[in-house]
Structure formats: C-alpha cells, structure tokens
Image (tube, helix red, strand yellow):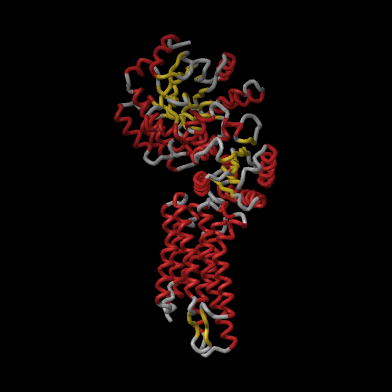
C-alpha cells in the first residue's frame, strides 16, 4: 500500500489547524463547522493508514482495534461530507432553512443510512472485512457506501449552484474544489485501492478554503478581533438576496475619536475589544444565531435573527444592556456616548447599500438628549433621503463637477470694510436640492473622497483669484479650508505649485485654514507640507479655535498668522464664564502676535462685544452671507466697500 499521500495530507491538516489558531478563526458557525471538518479529516486520515501498521496474522486484540479504526474512517469520512453541506448553508446564509428538525431530517438521513449499514456490517460483513491473515478487503456491497457518498456530493453540488449568487466567485470556486478533487480521488481509489488519495485531495481542498473562503482579514476587525465591516456588508447582501427578515441594531459611539485620542490607540483597542466581547456574549445568549459586527473606530452592528422583538420596550431594554456592558470603562475615565437605532430589514429599506448608508448616517437624525429610537421614526423625515443617499449624491457631484464655490466676505474692524472672504463649498443636487456642507464633508472624509473635493475647491479659488473680477473686489486674499487629509497628503505642496503656475497666482493672495484638530495631529508629512507652502509664500490661519484642546506650543510652532474663533465660543458670550474665557483667549492670542477672526457673528450686540475685546476681523450673517462669485461685486458696491 502507498500511504505517502496520507502522510502528506496529515501534514497539511496540521498546518491548517495551526493557521486557524494563528489567525484566530474560532468565532461563528462557519468557522466552527470548518474546524470540525478539519479535525474529522485528521481522524479519517489517521484511520486510513493505521490498520496497515499491524503485524499479520492479527491477534484478537489487534483485530478488534483494526476493525475499530476502519469503522472510525468510514464514520468520520462520511460525516465530513455532511458537515461540508452544513458549511454551505452557513456560508450562503440560508441556515434558517434547516433550523427545524423536520427540515434537518432529509439532510441527515443518508448519513443515518451509512451508520446503519456500517452497524449491519459488524454482524455480517458485506461492505468490508478485515481478515486476521490478509487484513482489509472490500465486500460485494461496498458500492452502496460509494452511492450514498456520491448522493451527498450531488446534494452539495446542487447547494453550490443554488448559492452561486450569494457567494463571491473566488470563494465559490474554492468551495467547488472540494467536490471536484474528492470525487476524482474517490473514483481513482475505487479503481485502484492501493492509491490512498481521498484524504490528500480533501486536504488540498480544505487548504484552498482556508486561503480563499475563511479569510480572517475579510471576516475579522484587526483591532478588536470580532467580526468586522467586510463581514457585515457581506451578510447584509446575503440577507437581501435570500429575502430573510431580520432586525439590525446600529450602535454609533459618537465620541470614539475623542476617546481614542484621549487614552491612546492601543488602550482604546483593548477597551473596545473587551466591551464588544461582553456585548457579543450577551446577544448570543439571547439567540445563538444573532451576530455582532464592528466598524472601526465606533460603529457596532447587531443582526438579530428575527423581527419578533421589534417594539419600543425591547429597544429600550437592549440599549440599557449595552450601556451597562460598556459602562465598566468609567473606572478608567472612559465614557462612551452612544446612539442606538433598531430597524427591520427588509422594510422601508430594501437594498444593501441603503442599509449601509443608514448605518453611517442614523446619528444625524437624533436631537437633544435622545439616545435610542426605532428606525421608522426617522424614515418619515423630509431629509431622510438626503442622508441615506449622500454617497451617491457626492459621487455624482464629483463626476459631474456640480459643486459650487460660494464666498463669505469678512469684515476688517480697523479698515472698516471687507478685505477678504472665505471660500465655502456648496452643493445643489438636481433631485434633493441644497445639501448641508457638513454632511458632504463628513461623508466625503469617511469615503476617502475629501481630497478630490478639496482639489476642486483649491483650483476653483485659484481660477477666481487670477481673474479680473477678483481684482475689482479689492480683497487682500481669499481663505481656503484644508482638510486633515490634504495637510498630510504626500506631494500636496507640489500639486499646489503646478496650480499656481497654471493660473499665475500670487501665493500672498491665498490663506489656508487648518482646523484645530489638524493642528494637534503631529504628523511629519503635514509639517513638511505646511512648511513648504509657507516657504512658497502662502499663509495660514487656525480654524475652529475653541472646538478642541489646543496645544499652544504646537500653535506657536506652526506657520500661523491668524486664529479664527469658532461660533461655539461666540454662542457662550451671554454667559459670564463664557465671556471671560473669550476675553482671556483674546489676550493670550494677542500676546503671541496672532490676528483674530470671530466667526458666527449674527447680531449687532455680539459684534460690539467682540470688537471691544479687540478682534481684528468679523465673519458672520450680521455682516455678510455666503454668495456666488458673480454676486460679490454687486454686494460690495451696495455696501460701498465699507460699513
């Protein structure tokens, strides 16, 4: 007998087990079934060659052991095929079809027949026999076992064909390889029983499944080791295709970025991992078929296996459980601010992309102190369609270049006239009308499109600044917001140099605004970009001062000349503490020779207060609203270029 293939198979199966352990592929039904298949395959492989290790003629003890091992091979080998079919049900997300015993019986029946046949063989050897003198030999009814095995193979093939639209093509081919390779090996071994190819072919197929189907980089979130974003998106797609009815819980940790910045990335990952493990255990206790998924840094999705608990009381109880489970972090000074939305799917939303978009945007619908809600409350809002189609809206705007630049004139307190303006992005969608800029920017950043939009803004401003119309405004410069991503983009300075030469723009006519968040991101690329632009003649201001935790040493090191006070500080002026915070901030900034712009000024009273404090420039609706470039000259003429 030639057992080299069995030895090679055994090595491969052990390697696969080590791969499973190293890649932490231990969660979820699919992984459990896959691990069971590997372990049973190891048992079958060992049982395939062990009986031939005995010395002949066999003693009674050795004969009993040889029979036991052979039966072990047939039991484990055929059970592997049954597990493979169950694995297909799990991977294709159609497990619900066999959850009831009545539906499981037809699937298990062929294996039950194999078990009965093997038990009958113990009484009357018809399928195989082990002789004390000659060892293993096939019986005249052995073909029955092969027929039952091929029946399972045909059933698996039908399942694969049915699941083709639910499973990625590469994964589908890897799954098919098990049937092709093992069927071919059984056929060859049926013709020549000395070639032990079955388990080797199984090992090759299982290795392909490890590489192309059970991919932890697609399944698991690398930070927390729970099911990740790719797994969630794949599950939503399968649910839509199979027309299952589920509930989806969407938990957004609205302060995830702040917490991560406060406690550090490593500690944040450990904290979130522990919290998610507790929440996952809890939802699994409610129903083993429930599943939790995580999108870094702060979106959690729970797919509930049915819709029977879709009611306000259940929603509230779930939210309370999550808050309690995640609340243990308070002892470490960590508090998670969460919004929890529960929705039915399919329902109002029927397409996977709609569900994914809603998961990203549901937090925008919350007002006040509200922390949880049924999704149907949001679906009736007039702005729901805008939020839920924002990705499509942004992509269409980029492709059609339908963004527009508005300019908001900024009032110079000393010169008593408008001496500059801020360029602001505006988008009017043909179907949904004007889209709030904050929604556009936040979603563009999430999708990695902010640099494309930022490039559009810069080029449009450069074009305008080089025009004769701009010269007529008398503006000293135009302010352009830079995103964090632009600040850290490799080669950003060279990109601007090309635009500068194309439009023949004097760098002194451009002032770049860097957000307070960007100013605290110690990043070599950002520092190099800002320094290069400063050397080219561009100037900078710090935007949104007062919305974060400013590092004054960092601000002092950056090539800044202007600081813009955010509207949130302006809104607190009526409060005595807010007034003195603003006043002292002015004094501190003046001490380091910074010019001060106050944003969000909407009344004469506020304008007078900030002027008395010593601000240099004022921006807000009280003086001027944002307007397209073609209206600027008319506005300035009406104001006489002074107030």
Residue at (43% x, 73% y) in the render: 197
Front-most of residues 502 and 223: 223
Q: Is residue 460 left or right of residue 520?
A: left
Q: Is residue 587 left or right of residue 420?
A: right
Residue at (55% x, 36% y) in the render: 551
Rendered position, 637 above or below 23: above
* Quadrant of the rendering where the N terminus is positioned: bottom left
Front-most of residues 398 and 451: 398
Front-most of residues 582 and 6: 6
Image coords of residue 398 (percent x, y): 39, 32
Image coords of residue 272 (percent x, y): 60, 48
Rendered position, 39 above or below 517: below
Residue 210 visible: no
The mark tally for this picture is 0
Image coords of residue 213 (percent x, y): 47, 57
Front-most of residues 241 and 118: 118
Residue 302 visible: yes
Image coords of residue 66 (percent x, y): 55, 82
Residue 30, quarter of picture: bottom right
Rendered position, 598 above or below 642: below
């Amino acid at each position: 007998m030639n057992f080299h293939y069995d030895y090679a198979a055994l090595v491969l199966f052990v390697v696969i087990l080590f791969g499973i352990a190293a890649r932490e592929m231990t969660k979820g039904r699919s992984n459990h079934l896959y691990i069971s298949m590997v372990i049973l395959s190891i048992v079958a492989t060992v049982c395939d060659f062990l009986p031939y290790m005995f010395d002949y003629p066999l003693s009674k003890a050795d004969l009993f052991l040889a029979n036991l091992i052979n039966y072990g091979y047939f039991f484990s080998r055929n059970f592997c095929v049954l597990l493979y079919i169950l694995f297909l049900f799990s991977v294709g997300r159609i497990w619900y079809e066999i959850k009831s015993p009545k539906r499981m019986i037809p699937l298990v029946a062929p294996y039950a027949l194999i078990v009965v046949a093997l038990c009958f063989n113990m009484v009357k050897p018809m399928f195989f026999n082990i002789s004390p003198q000659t060892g293993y030999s096939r019986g005249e009814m052995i073909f029955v076992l092969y027929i039952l095995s091929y029946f399972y193979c045909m059933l698996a093939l039908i399942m694969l064909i049915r699941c083709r639209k639910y499973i990625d093509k590469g994964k589908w081919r890897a799954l098919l390889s098990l049937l092709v390779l093992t069927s071919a090996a059984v056929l060859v071994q049926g013709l020549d029983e000395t070639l032990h190819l079955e388990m080797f072919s199984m090992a090759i197929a299982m290795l392909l499944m490890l590489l192309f189907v059970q991919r932890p980089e697609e399944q698991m979130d690398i930070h927390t080791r729970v099911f990740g974003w790719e797994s969630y998106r794949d599950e939503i797609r399968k649910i839509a295709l199979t027309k299952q009815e589920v509930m989806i819980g969407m938990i957004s940790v609205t302060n995830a970025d702040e917490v991560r910045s406060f406690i550090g990335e490593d500690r944040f990952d450990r904290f979130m991992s522990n919290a998610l493990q507790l929440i996952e255990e809890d939802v699994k206790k409610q129903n083993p078929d429930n599943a939790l998924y995580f999108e870094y840094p702060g979106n959690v999705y729970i797919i509930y296996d049915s819709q029977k608990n879709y009611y306000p009381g259940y929603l509230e109880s779930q939210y309370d459980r999550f808050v309690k489970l995640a609340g243990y972090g308070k002892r470490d000074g960590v508090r998670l601010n969460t919004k929890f939305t529960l929705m039915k799917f399919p329902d109002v939303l029927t397409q996977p992309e709609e569900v994914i978009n809603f998961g990203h945007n549901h937090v925008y619908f919350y007002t006040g102190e509200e922390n949880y809600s049924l999704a149907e409350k949001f679906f009736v809002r007039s702005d729901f369609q805008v939020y839920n189609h924002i990705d499509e809206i942004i992509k269409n705007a980029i492709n059609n270049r339908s963004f527009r630049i508005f300019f908001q004139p900024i009032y110079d307190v000393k010169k008593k006239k408008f001496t500059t303006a801020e360029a602001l992005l505006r988008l009017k969608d043909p179907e949904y009308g004007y889209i709030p800029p904050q929604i556009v920017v936040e979603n563009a950043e999430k999708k990695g499109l902010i640099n494309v939009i930022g490039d559009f803004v810069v080029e449009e401003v450069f074009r305008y600044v080089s025009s004769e119309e701009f010269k007529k405004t008398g503006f000293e410069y135009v302010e352009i917001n830079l995103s964090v991503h632009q600040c850290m983009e490799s080669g950003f300075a060279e990109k601007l140099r090309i635009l500068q030469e194309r439009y023949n723009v004097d760098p002194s006519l451009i002032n770049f605004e860097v957000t307070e968040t960007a100013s605290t991101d110690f990043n070599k690329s950002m520092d190099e970009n800002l320094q290069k632009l400063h050397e080219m003649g561009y100037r900078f201001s710090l935007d949104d001062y007062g919305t974060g935790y400013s590092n004054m040493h960092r601000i002092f090191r950056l090539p800044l000349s202007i600081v813009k006070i955010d509207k949130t500080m302006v809104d607190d002026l009526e409060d005595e503490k807010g007034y003195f915070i603003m006043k002292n901030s002015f004094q501190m900034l003046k001490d380091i020779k910074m010019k001060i712009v106050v944003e969000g000024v909407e009344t004469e009273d506020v304008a007078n207060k900030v002027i008395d404090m010593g601000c240099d420039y004022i921006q807000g609706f009280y003086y001027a609203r944002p307007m397209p470039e073609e209206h600027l000259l008319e506005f300035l003429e009406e104001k006489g270029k002074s107030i």
